[in-house]
Amino acid sequence: MKNISVIGVGYVGLVTAAAFSDLGNRVVALDINEEKIRNLESGIMPIYEPGLAEMVARNVRAGRLSFTTDYAVAAKDAEFVFICVGTPEGVDGEADLQYVRMAAESLARVMEHPLIVINKSTVPVGTGDWVAEIIRSTQPKPIEFAVVSCPEFLREGSALSDFMAPDRTVLGSENQSAADAVAQLHLPLRAPIVVTDLRTAEMIKYASNAFLATKISFINEIANICESLGADVEEVARGMGFDKRIGRSFLSAGVGYGGSCFPKDVKALKHMATLRGKHPQLLQAVIEINDFQRSIPVRKLQEMLGGNLNGKVIGLLGLAFKPGTDDMREAPALSIAEMLRAQGAIVRGYDPVSMSNVARTHPWIDLRQDAYDLVAGCDAVIVVTEWNEFKQLDKERVRDLMARPILIDGRNIYDPAYMRSIGFEYRAIGRGYNGEGTRNGN
Ligand code: UGA
């Protein structure tokens, strides 16, 4: 059992705290937001993540997990302190490090014994050295510490299982014994451990996210080419995916990637490169393709509705940036809703878990109780998020409820032939449309 503190109870922090306490360690999780901490103490989670509330409750009950807003409490017995604060997008795509700075300074002020500071937040290459410098210059008296980078690779929606069964653990440090101690902490996860220097570890995180985003933009570009050539991108991805060098994952064409990571991280990497005089052309293309992809359902609708969306009622089926989360950060649904609104359409939305978040930021989206309530009277519906419950909808009922059965399947979750056979005017992404109605008839 080790004594661990976690600074920041966002996605990464809360999952890290819950998981390490579940592995038998004693964990103190800190956040400066008092309301979040009060809520957590009474079992209310700040985010929706399958299994998280149960895991937190179990470990609080067992006395292994506690919460605080006080850095002195968090630092008191800690051998390892994980920094898991947000690094939002700042000016020009540069990561905003103000929360990392605050965390490092606050910790340095109350440090009373040697400890290892582990950075889990996604931070620009070089931040580990900068954190060490902040701690050194803020400490009231010199106390030994080491900084280790341990980037997190978990996905929202499957965060706990990703944390507990990662493909690899990456550790970067200039201090070998600190890296070894952090490696020990991760041994129960039974993943290969890559130990390298600080900057390389930080870069592995950016390169991994940028590569996954590139796969998505690549398949979206292929999808658009498929439409003009009468090929089906779903089959293309399947056919490509059997090649072990390529793999099938992250080759699902759709309305583009969103979330708190890919958009921000690709821009931040581009910014780091540009600052050093490089021309990251591929990253630029990945961003442009992703922006364009969000407009595709709207373009399709314009074409089908004779170029005029004014006064048309359009339903968005799914709002979260992906299934399994209530996170609306950079969600394609919001870009699509804004585009539709700009053209005079009346925008409706339904999502199983993210609606309270949407209601706060986009009160003009007419939120509905369920999928059937959403489609009733709509001139067109766009599938934006591929929640499982949408796959099982009674399609004939949907068709009958709609004013006109136009369905844009932004995530390719339905069978085009079946949808058309029951009377939908159905369009998907990259599935054999050449603008003149070839193979798949759309
Ligand atoms: C992503 C990475 O997958 C994690 O490894 C990483 O730890 C995390 O960012 C992070 O940096 O914190 P996440 O943003 O939770 O995780 O979600 P993903 O499942 O990767 O999906 C991102 C976006 O890509 C979603 O909008 C999803 O709809 C889209 N996507 C994904 C596609 O459009 N097509 C695909 O084939 C896969």
Image (cartoon, rainbow, N blue to C red):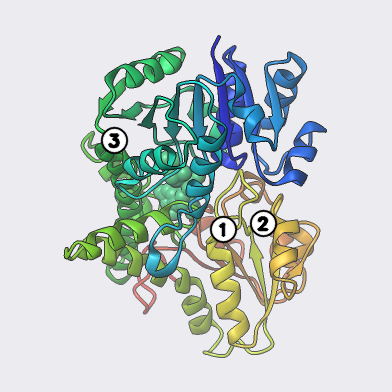
Residue 173 percent across, percent down from the top left: 30, 29
Q: Image check: 9 left or right of 80?
A: right
Circle number at residue 62: none
Tag 2 secondary structure: helix
Q: Nearer the viewer, residue 124 or 425?
A: 124
How far from the left and from the top, in percent, is residue 288?
34, 70
Q: Which residue is mark 3?
A: 198
The amino acid on which the numbered mark 2 sits, given as a three-letter code, is Lys
Q: Earlier in the sequence, mark 3 or mark 1?
A: 3
Residue 199 occupies quadrant:
top left
Residue indicated by mark 1: 329
Q: Is residue 297 left or right of residue 27?
A: left
Q: Amino acid at mark 1?
A: Arg
Q: Residues within 10 Å of mark 3 (few under 14, many from 20)?
A: many
The residue lying toward the viewer, choosing from 438 and 257, is 257
Q: Is residue 286 visible?
A: yes
Q: Which of disc 1 and disc 2 is earlier in sequence?
A: 1
Q: Which residue is mark 2?
A: 395
- In the rendered image, the residue lying farthest to the top is 1
Ligand 1 is within 8 Å of the C-beta of the residue at disc 1:
no
CA neighbours of label 2 inside 10 A, class few (<14), some (14 to 19), many (20+): some
Q: Is residue 400 visible?
A: no
Residue at point 59%, 79% (across, down): 340
Q: Nearer the viewer, mark 2 or mark 3?
A: 3
Is the N terminus in the top left, top right, bottom left or bottom right quadrant?
Answer: top right
Three-letter code, disc 3: Leu
Element type at marker 3? helix
386 to the left or right of 275:
right
Q: Residue at x 36, y 61 (%)?
A: 267
Dot 1: within a 10 Å radius of its alpha carbon, few (fewer than 14), some, or many (20 or more) residues? some
Q: Position of residue 131 (x, y in %)?
A: 40, 42
Q: Position of residue 401 (x, y in %)?
A: 76, 67
